Image (spheres, rainbow, N blue to C red):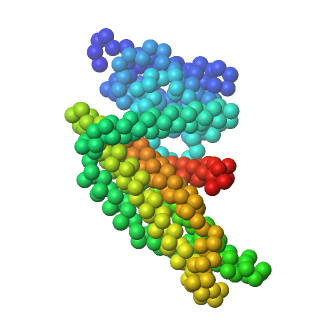
Amino acid sequence: MSVSAQPARAEATQEGEALAVTLAGDWIITAPRPGWNSLLAGRAPKRVVLRDAGLGQWDSSVLLFLFEVQQWARLTGAHADTKALPAKIHALLNQMSASHETTVPFDRSQNFIEGVGEATLDLARKGRKFASFLGECVLGAVRLVKRPQKFRWADCLDEMQQCGAMALPIVSLISFLVGVTLAYTGAIVLRQYGGDIYVADLIGLSMVREMGALMTGVVLAGRTGAAFAATLGNMKANEEIDALETLGLSAVDFLVLPRLFALFVMMPLLAMYANALGIVGGMAVSMSVLKIPPTAYWVEMLTIVDLSDLLVGTIKAATFGLIIGLSGCLRGIEAERSAAGVGRAATSAVVTAILLIIVADAIFAVLFDILKL
C-alpha cells in the first residue's frame, strides 16, 4: 500500500430498525480491512443500508466485504440494500452473488410494497429493452429492403433447415397426439348426446384456429428459441459480436435478421403441417373408437372449417415465429460473458417466448372476435 493511501474504513450507525454502514478509504486486498462480524457487534438489524462515504481506490477487497454482508443477510432474513454504492461495485457484486447462488431465501424481510415497486420497474425496464430491440430489427429490415444484396441468404436458408425441416419429427409427434387427445376428450361429451360426428368439427376448428399454431410455437420456443439464445450467448462470451461491431457490421443485420426471417417463413408452414397431423390423429380415433368413416369425418369437418379459419391460424403462427426469434436473439445478445450466463439466457429465452406467445394468443382471441373472424 502506498504512503498516500487511506486505510479502509467502515462505520455502522443505527437508524431505527436499519443499520447504516458507510464505506470510506482505500480498499486494497493486500491491506487490512474491517470485518463484518466485528462491525455488527452483536446487533440484529432487519435492514442494512450500505453507502459510499468517500471510497478511494478499491479492488476485490470491498467486494468480499459486501458479499460477507449479503451472506449474513441471507441467513438471518435481513435486507441488504446496496443501491447507494457506485454502479460498478453494484454490478460486480451482482455477478459475484449470481455465481454463488444458494437455496437460502434472500431479502425475506423486504417491504412488500417496495418489492412490488421494484418488480414493476424491472418489468418496465425489460419492456423498454424488448421494444428497443424490436425497433432495431425493424430499422435493420428497412435497410435490407433497400439493399437486399446485403442480406445473408445462405445463413437464412441454413436456419430454415434447422428450425423447419429438422423440427418435423417432434412437431409431427406432438400434433398427432394433440389431435388424438382432443378426439378422446370431445367424445366423452358428444357421445352422451349422440353427436359423435361433431368430433370432426371440434378437431378441425381447434387444430386450424388454435392448437396447430400454439403447439408448434411452444415446441419451437423450447427447441429453436433456446438454440438462438445459446448460439448468440456463446458468440458474445467469445467476443465474436464485439469483433463484428468493431469491423462496422451490425449484429442485428448480420445475426438476428436471418434468424427472424427463417422463423417467420417456416412457422406458418409448420403450423399447417401440424394442423394436418392433428386432423389425422382425430380421424384415427374417430374411425377406431367412434366408428366414423374417414370420408364422413372429412366432409363434416369441411362444413365448419373454411379459409378464414386457416388465415387466423397462419397469422398466429407467423406472429409466434417473430416472438420466438426476438426472444431468443435478445436473450442471447444480452447474455453474460460466461457459461452460466449462456445457460440462463437459454432458459430465459424459452420462458419469455412462451409467456409472450400466450399473451399474444389471448390478444388475438379478443381481436378476431371483434373482427368476426
Camera-nearest residue between 32 and 96: 96
Quarter of the figure with the N terminus:
top left
Residue situated in front as seen by the camera: 263 or 103 = 263
Residue at position x 56%, y 34% from top? 124
Residue 291: give x, y in percent of width and height.
64, 89
Residue that extends furthest to the left in the rendered view of this protein: 247
Image height of 104 relative to 202, above or below? above
Indicate the position of residue 50 as horizontal and vertical percent values: 53, 24
Q: Quadrant of residue 44?
A: top right
Please indicate, yes or no, whether residue 41 appears anywhere in the rendered image: no
Q: Is residue 76 left or right of residue 55?
A: right
Compared across the picture, whether 144 is left or right of 116 comes to left
Q: Is residue 233 above or below residue 200?
A: above
Is 345 on the left or on the right of 309, as rendered? left
* Residue drawn at point x = 56 percent, y = 47 percent: 104
Residue ID at (53%, 77%)? 280
Q: Residue at position x 41%, y 19% from top?
A: 8
Q: Depth check: 59 or 357 in front?
A: 357
Q: Position of residue 12 (x, y in %)?
A: 56, 21
Pick the quarter of the image with the C terminus. bottom right
So how many labels did they put on this image? 0
In the current view of this chain or complex, which residue is farthest to the top?
4
Query: Outermost residue, right direction?
Result: 193
Give how far across and how far down residue 54 sits, in percent: 44, 14
Can the viewer see residue 58? yes
